[in-house]
Image: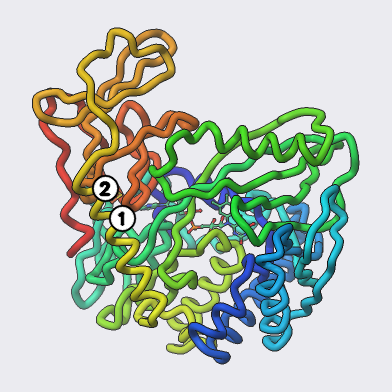
Amino acid sequence: MLIEADRILQGTTGHTTAKISSQHALIYDKLKNQMGEEKARQYAEANQKAIQFIADTAAEKGIDCDLAWRPAYVYTQSDKYVKQIENEEKAASSLGIKASIVHELPLPFKIKAALRFDGQAQFHPLKYLKALVKVLPDSVRIFEQTRAINIEEGNTAAVITNQGKKVVASKVVIASHYPFFDGGGMYFSRVYPSRSYAVGVTITEKFPEGMFISAESPTRSLRSTPLGDEELVLVVGEDHKTGQSKNTATHYDNLLKFAHDIYEVREVKYRWSTQDYITLDGVPYVGNLTSQHPDLYVATGFGKWGITNGTASAMVIKDLIIHGDSPWKEVYTPSRFNVASAVNFVVSNADVAKHLIAGKFKPTEDLEDLPPGEARIIYADGDKVGAFRDEKGELHLVDITCTHMGCELAWNEAERSWDCPCHGSRFTYEGDIIEGPALSHLHHPGEGPNQVEPNVIQ
Ligand SMILES: Cc1cc2nc3c(=O)[nH]c(=O)nc-3n(C[C@H](O)[C@H](O)[C@H](O)COP(=O)(O)OP(=O)(O)OC[C@H]3O[C@@H](n4cnc5c(N)ncnc54)[C@H](O)[C@@H]3O)c2cc1C
Ligand code: FES
């Protein structure tokens, strides 16, 4: 049984760049150094197998999902990254990946070096997943608009839904992007949310057959996809921690400027932004929720590479449930501990503490001059209130204390949402949940303060 809080396929997977690639920017040299040869090999193999699984499944089921084999490149325009790219080539090749260094790209700018992976692919994730849903056996039941809010543990687990129903199951897989149940795994302190932006443009020339990403920041990621008779070029990048950008609208401007700098842009067809969770050491947490939970499994923290990592997670968890073991369980196990995790734990939680303690805007009581389409933070009866005036002039006021664990929300002008800098919950300007771990909506002034959810730290 699949329980979905909203509609299936509308989350990050519906807004991804959808490169099906084991080239996760620069990762293998780091993995070898931090986790050792064996675990780096597991990561490479899992992601390579995931590419093959998606391609085989699409072929076997006859799924028309624009799947195309393309080389993947991570490039640099800076001398600083050349050595890292060379080290990455050595590390990836030693793990069995077909990797090579090139000094030119079929893109209209010069580079210092790039790492090419062959045998990579791209697709339309929703065309693929919608077709998969159709071929599920009748015994698989999907319940949309059913939010899981807790798990009661016992001989068999009971997942509690927001309608107060209990779903009893011998095995539960928590695949809700951010885990809705913590179980003492301290996920709230071990993953952080990061947003990225995308624009879809048509250009006057043909885009080359490849997928590209920069090694340096700000990230620039490029690929093309068919759009009817046309070709859409996806330009993606501008990462930042959720709720921690001063002006989110500028990120679209920066991507568009980049697109205009390198191509003659015919039309800007689409733009969107979305977020993913990043773990402390950059490897997803996949496997038993904690060592104390033999029947609860989690898959989270895909670090913006969840197309292959998500597919690999399904293979790992399937193997753990059916066979009690997986060849890749060690690299992904959520119970792992290493030095990189420990250092990042301190940095990441200092950041959360900062947002728990203090807001970053100067409050003002004056809303008369708040123009339509803009938001401001004010004090009302001692609470911090977020005010947004819509185009009709109507004012929308919400308590901006996050209902998850109490951090102060920040206004996201590009998406017109209140975003949490701590664990990535997002709310509409009317206070409804968009995504993230929060289980209840924001209150309006006069309704009393927001109830902060206690369940995440159970
Ligand atoms: C801009 C961007 C570009 C990316 N590009 C790539 C790429 O090229 N290649 C790649 O491999 N990866 C890429 N990624 C990463 C990849 O898209 C994600 O890792 C992946 O889509 C995450 O999948 P998910 O199933 O964990 O989350 P989602 O797709 O968000 O699905 C989670 C689902 O759980 C539901 N849910 C949440 N809470 C509950 C609850 N309490 N109860 C019930 N249901 C709940 C949500 O409604 C949602 O439908 C990119 C990510 C970003 C942000
Ligand atoms: S999402 Fe955790 S405090 Fe807001």
> Depth check: 129 or 72 in front?
72
Q: Amino acid at mark 2?
A: His
The residue carrying mark 2 is 355
Q: Residue at x 52, y 71 (%)?
A: 314
Answer above or below: position of 297 versus 107. below
In the rendered image, residue 9, in percent from the top left (x then y), is placed at: 53, 49
Most extreme residue toward the front, as rendered? 79
Answer above or below: position of 320 versus 447. below
| Quadrant assignment, res 395 | top left
Q: Amino acid at mark 1?
A: Asp
User: Is mark 1 in CB contact (under 8 Å) with mark 2?
Assistant: yes
> Depth check: 316 or 304 in front?
304
Q: Under 8 Å from ligand 2: the CB of mark 1?
A: no
Can residue 130 be seen? no
Which disc number belongs to residue 351? 1
Answer above or below: position of 304 versus 287. above
Please give left or right for residue 113 compared with residue 236 in the image. right
Q: Under 8 Å from ligand 2: the CB of mark 2?
A: yes
Q: Residue at x 48, y 49 (%)?
A: 240
Secondary structure under tag 1 reads helix
Q: Residue at x 28, y 8 (%)?
A: 368
Please give left or right for residue 416 compared with residue 270 in the image. left
| Quadrant assignment, res 336 | bottom left
